[in-house]
């Protein structure tokens, strides 16, 4: 930060498979493209949530795919995350030219407010600066409180949302069964699964059942194989190919808020980390 004194700096804490971060990144990219020439620096701090996000090659691949051109710091030990006393992804810290934190936004949204303050701080640091017109990107932050919350598929978090009929087993290949229907915000397993403190790994006949309310559903996946998505609403099943860098995959998308139940069939060896919603 000492080397950036005299510049307005936006520090953005993120992690690449986070849907909230992915929705906010277009706004961060736009701020950098629009105001960097006027004195704004952006530093992305990539603080991983899942084990695969510690792999720098995965972060580099995701950064390139997302089109980020500003510096991204690797914060695998969470030291910068902790030094800022941060607890959220994403989180934006806006710092003025004297090195003072002038604004903090935890989570998505408030992009107009962030941009207005960027403009103010740039003009304060250089009254002669010629600023471009403000951006016009839409804010896609979900606002409906009925939207299902993130659902983790690890042994530590699963008891909060598990609706299966078989007891959860830690790090033991287990044949699971599920009830006929799954309530909203709940998840159940069918077939063989191995569950640990990071993820659930599919075995023979592996299926995931999910009850949800959302416009979009996503699943963080790793490995190579396919996921067959059955929405149970008369639409034909959809098959998603999983390969390459572990990442977030879109399962469903509807124009408005939708309540339903998903049935997912996963290839053996695929690793499922968490459902997220929009």
Image: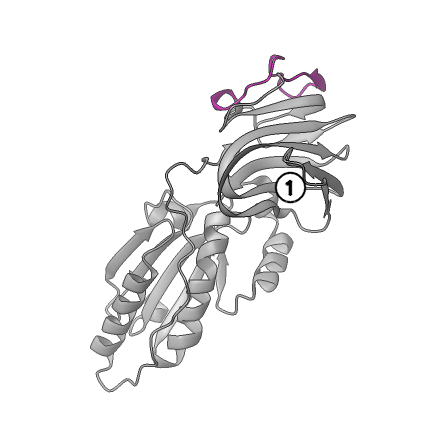
In this rendering, would 226 be left or right of 261? right
Residue 239 lies in quadrant: top right
Residue 55: image location, x then y, percent: 61, 49
- Which sits in the foreground, 128 or 256? 256
Magenta range: 159-178
Asked if residue 153 shows in the view, the reply is: no
- Which sits in the foreground, 120 or 44? 120
Against 130, is 93 above or below?
above
Residue 2: image location, x then y, percent: 33, 66
Against 262, is 243 above or below?
below
Element at badge 1?
Answer: strand
In this rendering, would 232 be left or right of 95? right
Residue drawn where x is 34% and y is 61% of the image: 111
In this rendering, would 171 be left or right of 15? right
Residue drawn where x is 60% and y is 64% of the image: 64
Residue drawn where x is 34% and y is 67% of the image: 9
Taking the magenta stretch, the answer to whether it contains residue 172 is: yes
Near mark 1 (Cα within 10 A), the count class, few <14, some 14-19 or many ≥20, is many
- Which sits in the foreground, 23 or 90? 23
Q: Quadrant of the N terminus?
A: bottom left
- Residue corresponding to mark 1: 221
Against 64, is 20 above or below?
above
């Amino acid at each position: 930060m000492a080397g950036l004194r005299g510049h307005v700096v936006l520090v953005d804490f993120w992690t690449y498979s986070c849907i909230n971060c992915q929705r906010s990144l277009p706004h961060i990219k736009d701020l950098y493209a629009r105001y960097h020439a006027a004195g704004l620096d952006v530093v992305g701090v990539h603080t991983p949530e899942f084990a695969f996000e510690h792999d720098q090659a995965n972060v580099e691949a995701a950064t390139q795919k997302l089109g980020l051109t500003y510096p991204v710091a690797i914060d695998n030990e969470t030291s910068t995350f902790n030094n800022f006393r941060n607890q959220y992804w994403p989180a934006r810290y806006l710092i003025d030219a004297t090195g003072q934190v002038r604004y903090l936004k935890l989570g998505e949204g408030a992009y107009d407010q962030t941009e207005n303050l960027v403009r103010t701080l740039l003009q304060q640091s250089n009254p002669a600066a010629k600023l471009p017109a403000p951006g016009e990107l839409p804010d896609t932050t979900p606002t409906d409180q009925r939207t299902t919350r993130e659902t983790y598929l690890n042994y530590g978090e699963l008891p909060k949302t598990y609706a299966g009929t078989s007891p959860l087993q830690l790090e033991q290949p287990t044949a699971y069964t599920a009830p006929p229907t799954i309530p909203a915000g709940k998840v159940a397993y069918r077939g063989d699964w191995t569950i640990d403190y990071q993820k659930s790994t599919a075995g023979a006949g592996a299926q995931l059942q999910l009850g949800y309310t959302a416009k979009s559903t996503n699943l963080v996946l790793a490995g190579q194989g396919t996921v067959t998505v059955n929405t149970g609403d008369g639409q034909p099943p959809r098959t998603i190919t999983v390969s390459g860098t572990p990442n977030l995959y879109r399962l469903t998308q509807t124009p408005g808020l939708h309540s339903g139940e998903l049935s997912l069939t996963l290839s053996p060896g695929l690793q499922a980390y968490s459902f997220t919603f929009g």
